[in-house]
């Protein structure tokens, strides 16, 4: 199943190049009083929600996807976890390019671990990327994003996939500079998630997916998730040795080689096998 959030927080089920508005299914979600939960209610209720969506969808007309504004399919992640330099060739290019490493040693992911991005950086493809610090290099980084579906702590890799609800395409944008990653990657609009959320059962093998990113039609990044240094299960095992994960938490699994700068006016096209394709416009903030 492919679920999207579109226009004014409508919920849709994606079928080919069309969407059916199944917002009425959200009526089954629990109503929360303060303090609000630390998870995304839609993802936490996904099993019941799917049954409600399936009962509604057949009686809802199809609308062209091209005519809707796609927002981030996950509205309320408790946290965004990200894996740096998790492809060998990207580690090599980061060490060789001073525009990336800024005179700092680039260590292996096993040594530097993961980092957190601000949830305020999250947008959908239709909202676009708003660049700040235009005097610096702002780079694109395509990544497979895994969405947590079940809470857990100290999750062994053998059971990691039991805790994944589904997948999206992610863009982990970054301002190059000497500051810590979490600061430079948490600029508003610097986490793009989309174009929709694909439930885990609809993805054959997430450890063998082709991914590609082009800027203005020029392919910059192209790889397969089999090339990850730490696979998805290992990342979840590692992350949950530090954090409890909750439904809706997003795990960005790392970007391959080919990262490079973007400018206002550029148009990015990001694709991941089994998920889909999204286009994102770049502008000045």
Image (tube, rainbow, N blue to C red):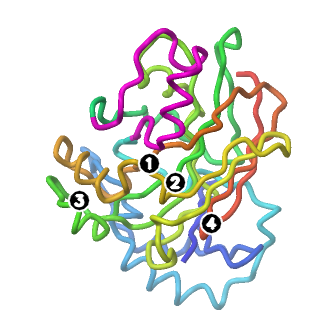
CB atoms at circles 4 and 2 under 8 Å apart?
no
Q: Is residue 130 above or below residue 270?
A: above
Q: CA distance from mark 1 to mark 2?
A: 6 Å
- Tell me which residue sits at (68%, 48%) in the image: 125
Image quarter of the C terminus = top right
Q: Which residues are magenta?
A: 82-110
**Circle 3 residue:** 151
CB atoms at circles 1 and 2 under 8 Å apart?
yes
Relative placement, left or right, of 12 versus 146 is right
CB atoms at circles 3 and 4 under 8 Å apart?
no
Crowd class of label 1 (few under 14; some 14 to 19; many from 20; radius 10 Å): many
**Mark number displayed over residue 273:** 4
Q: Was residue 97 drawn as part of the magenta stretch in this picture?
A: yes
Relative placement, left or right, of 104 versus 44 is right
Q: Earlier in the sequence, mark 3 or mark 1?
A: 3
Element at label 1 = loop
Q: Earlier in the sequence, mark 2 or mark 3?
A: 2
Nearer to me, 164 or 41: 164
- The image shows residue 18 at horizontal and vertical percentages of 75, 74
- Tell me which residue sits at (66%, 50%) in the image: 222
**Circle 2 residue:** 144
Q: Is residue 134 above or below residue 112?
A: above
**Circle 1 residue:** 253
Relative placement, left or right, of 204 versus 161 is right
Q: Is residue 143 above or below residue 274?
A: above
Q: Earlier in the sequence, mark 3 or mark 4?
A: 3
Mark nearest the camera among 2 and 3 is 2
Q: Is residue 44 above or below residue 135?
A: below
Q: CA distance from mark 3 to mark 1?
A: 18 Å
Element at label 4 = loop
């Amino acid at each position: 199943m492919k679920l999207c959030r579109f226009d004014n927080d409508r919920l849709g089920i994606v079928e080919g190049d069309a969407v059916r508005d199944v917002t009425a299914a959200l009526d089954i979600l629990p109503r929360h009083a303060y303090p609000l939960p630390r998870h995304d209610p839609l993802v936490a209720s996904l099993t019941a929600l799917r049954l409600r969506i399936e009962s509604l969808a057949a009686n809802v007309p199809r609308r062209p996807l091209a005519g809707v504004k796609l927002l981030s399919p996950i509205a309320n992640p408790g946290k965004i976890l990200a894996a740096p330099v998790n492809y060998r060739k990207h580690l090599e290019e980061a060490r060789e390019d001073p525009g990336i490493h800024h005179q700092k040693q680039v260590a292996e992911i096993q040594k530097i671990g993961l980092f957190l991005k601000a949830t305020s950086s999250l947008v959908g493809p239709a909202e676009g990327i708003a660049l700040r610090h235009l005097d610096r290099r702002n780079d694109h980084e395509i990544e497979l994003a895994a969405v947590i579906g079940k809470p857990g702590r100290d999750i062994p890799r053998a059971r990691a996939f039991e805790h994944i609800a589904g997948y999206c395409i992610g863009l982990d944008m970054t301002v190059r500079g000497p500051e810590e990653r979490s600061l430079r990657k948490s600029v508003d609009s610097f986490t793009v998630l989309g174009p929709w959320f694909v439930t885990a059962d609809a993805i054959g093998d997430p450890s063998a997916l082709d991914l590609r990113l082009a800027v203005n039609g020029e392919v910059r990044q192209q790889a397969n998730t089999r090339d990850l240094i730490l696979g998805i299960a290992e990342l979840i095992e590692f992350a949950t040795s530090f954090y409890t994960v909750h439904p809706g938490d997003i795990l960005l699994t790392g970007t391959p080689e080919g990262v490079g700068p973007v400018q206002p006016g550029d148009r990015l096209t990001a694709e991941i096998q089994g998920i889909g394709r999204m286009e994102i416009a770049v502008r000045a903030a």
